[in-house]
């Protein structure tokens, strides 16, 4: 009988590497969007709420998100810069006036030390979020300009695949439906004709995809333009857009309403 060498495992079946991988994935899922200098969309959980949901400490939740490139702040950048320059933990503590635990929490888990998964997937998610954030800022900056409609469609394209939810009824959002959409490709071959400026590689039609995964209703770019203009007018006149029906676009309003809220066109109530 062959004997195995080494000390017996204290926790048979426990795998630290897998545990950390799962925690990173959970933290990213709860965060939804990266913490970029603590800027967040309304209604998303705070770092404390994420830590509470994971039944862990705020410092560990932050470290997990930093590892996934889902958290950045002036302090995290300063700590990581000094660490990259070869400063020791005590030196960083003294330089920045931080405790040891805080310094470690601003440094990512090292892939070589913990056999962590390639962070490319998480980085891509963070990159996509930042691109979406940038295009919304551009849309706002181009308001009332000749190319406003172009930037609106760029925003629509940027949020392709993003999960939205219709408003539903009442406090409990009865009847609310989650959905995403897909943009038609190649304006000349698919997508409805549009007289404005096109975007290379994309058509001028969006297809609503519900939780079943099948394409449902199609909405033309012209309809998106109309909803956008009506929303801006309502916001200017009344300071609000009271629900999808206020857009005056039967059939498409329930889908375009949450999209325009996410774009910052309609104030979230």
Image (cartoon, grey):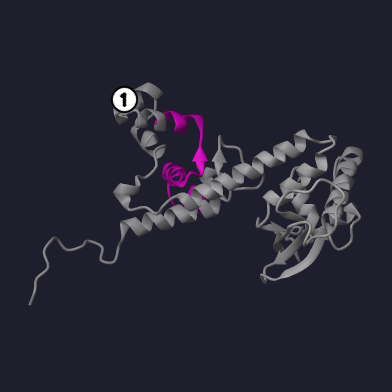
Could you say which is closer to the camera, residue 155 or residue 70?
155
Could you say which is closer to the camera, residue 231 or residue 46?
231
Q: Residue at x 11, y 64 (%)?
A: 5
Q: Quadrant of residue 160?
A: bottom right
Residue identified by numbered label 1: 91
- Looking at the rendering, in which quadrant would you find the N terminus? bottom left
Q: Residue at x 62, y 43 (%)?
A: 131
Q: Quadrant of residue 229?
A: top right
Could you say which is closer to the camera, residue 109 or residue 119?
119
Query: Relative to 28, is 180 on the left or the right?
Result: right
Q: Which residues are magenta?
A: 50-79
Q: Quadrant of residue 19?
A: bottom left
Q: Is residue 106 above or below residue 9?
A: above
Q: Is residue 119 above or below residue 139?
A: below
Main secondary-structure element of the magenta-colored stretch:
helix
Q: Residue at x 29, y 66 (%)?
A: 13
As drawn, which residue projects farthest toward the top?
Answer: 95
Helix, strand or loop for disc 1: helix
- Residue 17 visible in the current orientation: yes
């Amino acid at each position: 009988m062959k004997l195995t060498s080494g000390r017996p495992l204290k926790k048979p079946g426990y795998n630290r590497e897998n545990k950390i991988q799962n925690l990173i994935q959970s933290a990213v899922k709860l965060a939804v969007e990266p913490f970029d200098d603590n800027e967040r969309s309304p209604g998303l959980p705070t770092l404390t709420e994420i830590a509470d949901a994971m039944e862990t400490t705020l410092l560990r939740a932050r470290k997990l998100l930093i590892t996934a490139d889902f958290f950045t702040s002036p302090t995290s950048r300063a700590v990581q810069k000094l660490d990259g320059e070869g400063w020791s933990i005590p030196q960083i503590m003294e330089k920045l006036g931080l405790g040891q635990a805080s310094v470690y929490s601003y440094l990512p888990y090292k892939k070589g030390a913990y056999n962590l998964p390639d962070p490319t997937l998480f980085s891509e998610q963070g990159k996509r979020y930042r691109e979406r954030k940038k295009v919304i800022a551009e849309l706002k900056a181009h308001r009332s300009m000749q190319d406003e409609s172009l930037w609106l469609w760029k925003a629509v394209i940027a949020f392709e695949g993003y999960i939205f939810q219709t408003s539903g009824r009442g406090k409990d959002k009865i009847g609310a439906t989650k959905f995403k959409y897909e943009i038609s490709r190649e304006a000349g071959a698919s997508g409805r004709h549009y007289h404005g400026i096109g975007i290379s590689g994309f058509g001028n039609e969006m297809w609503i995809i519900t939780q079943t995964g099948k394409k449902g209703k199609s909405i033309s770019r012209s309809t998106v333009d109309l909803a956008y203009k009506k929303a801006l007018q309502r916001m200017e006149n009344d300071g609000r857009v009271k629900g999808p029906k206020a857009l005056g676009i039967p059939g498409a309003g329930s889908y375009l309403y949450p999209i325009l809220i996410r774009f910052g066109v309609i104030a979230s109530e």
